[in-house]
Amino acid sequence: MTDKKFTLRNVRPWGAEAADVTISGGVITGLAPASGAFESGDLDGGGLLAIPGFINTHAHVDKSWWGKPWVPYTYSDHPTVEGWIANERAQRGNYDIPNANSAAAVLREFLRHGTTATRTHIDVDLGIGLKGLETVQAAVAELDGAIEVQTVAFPQDGVLRRPGVMQLLDEAAQAGADSIGGLDPGTIDGDVEGQLDGLFQIAVERGVGLDLHLHDFGSLGAYEYRQVIRRTIDAGLQGRVNISHGFAMGTLQPAVQEEIVEGLAEAGISWTTVAMGGTAPLPWQRMRERGVPLGLGTDGIRDLWSPFGDGDLLRVAFAFARLHGFRHDDKLATAVEYATKHGAPFVGREQHDLVAGARADIVLLDAENVPDVLVRCPQRRLALSGGRVVARDGDVLV
């Protein structure tokens, strides 16, 4: 955040008529029709389209080898979650994963693409302890507030099946993690109730959130959703629990989907997706109607799970739109909204928009309108984070 007071002149908020945006103390203080007047310290928006900064609600910045020499993908052509985990554990030491330099490089790539806030999962396990959390905290400090980061201590290798991991999660919560995570309690730990009971206990005792990776399909997936819903209500953790991926949701029968969505709404549980190709579309319209927050994320970026990913959340919004069959302008705009303003609750914000009182996270693009932004994914011409210019024409300035 910057204490500077200035005006971002001649921009088109969400593609509307040209406006001047006044900023003070890193916060938007007002919008008015473009006046054509300039004062010392003002920024010229050049009539570019303006949207809020992107919010990446599901990342893994500790795992990446971004900025390092290319690492060939060597795992099986028929991968499984269990196999990916084992492969990563066997190889990560060869590539100095995790390390603060790579994490900072990924965060800078986020900024280059206009992402000004993120929630990132960070591996916590018996092999590395809390090193991942420490390296990401160091990377965030290196960027000096240019990007806001919420952290999730994530037990990628399982919880109950690795005695001592539950204690590590508790220690991570005490060491500054905003949330703790879980992973497929049915197939990884073989004990849905046991894993969830332990995680919810830590969340309540330490006052942190929960963000659970749930990949399981079929009746097991639905059962896990029901168990998370019930425990969230019983623990009074409404608004503090998130389900990541949740691949089963789109495959469930409509009546079961409706039941789960109603439960999510009652429990105040949010949902994040990376819009992975080949997965079933979510009942996103019903989720929106019932007020279930839905966020978009990049997942891993150039790591031992996959060589793909470039940190551009707009491309994820594009994939979300394609996966769900969007073609009309209002729905194309909705995809961009999910990647920006609707990400607010995932990083602890009440609002994230081009309105007075919101943090001055603003991205400028050369585009005709918001649907054009989505389908072309143009370069981010300017990115402000807390009123501070952090990227310009593809160059990161921090």
Image: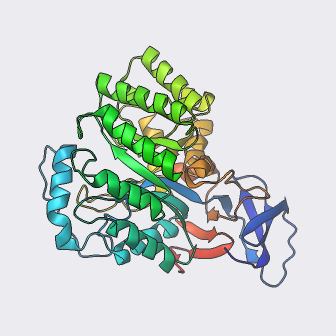
Provide residue 141's location: percent of width, then percent of height.
50, 77
**Vertical arrangement, residue 223 with respect to residue 371, above or below:** above
Q: Quadrant of residue 12?
A: bottom right
Q: Quadrant of the N terminus?
A: bottom right
**Front position in the image: 325 or 191:** 191
**Front position in the image: 382 or 225:** 225
**Vertical arrangement, residue 280 with respect to residue 161, above or below:** above
**Vertical arrangement, residue 292 with respect to residue 204, above or below:** above
Q: Is any part of residue 305 visible from this angle?
A: yes
**Front position in the image: 25 or 114:** 25
Name the residue located 57 percent from the left edge and 55 percent from the top edge: 347
Q: Is any part of residue 317 visible from this angle?
A: no
Provide residue 114's location: percent of width, then percent of height.
55, 64
Provide residue 159's location: percent of width, then percent of height.
28, 47
Q: Is residue 294 left or right of residue 51?
A: left
Name the residue located 46 percent from the left edge and 61 percent from the top edge: 174
Instruction: Spot the residue most to the top.
Output: 255
Q: Is residue 373 left or right of residue 197?
A: right
Name the residue located 18 percent from the left edge and 43 percent from the top edge: 80
Instruction: Spot the residue most to the front.
Output: 205
Instruction: Spot the residue most to the bottom.
Output: 40
Name the residue located 54 percent from the left edge and 31 percent from the top edge: 233
Total labels drawn: 0
Provide residue 150's location: percent of width, then percent of height.
51, 60
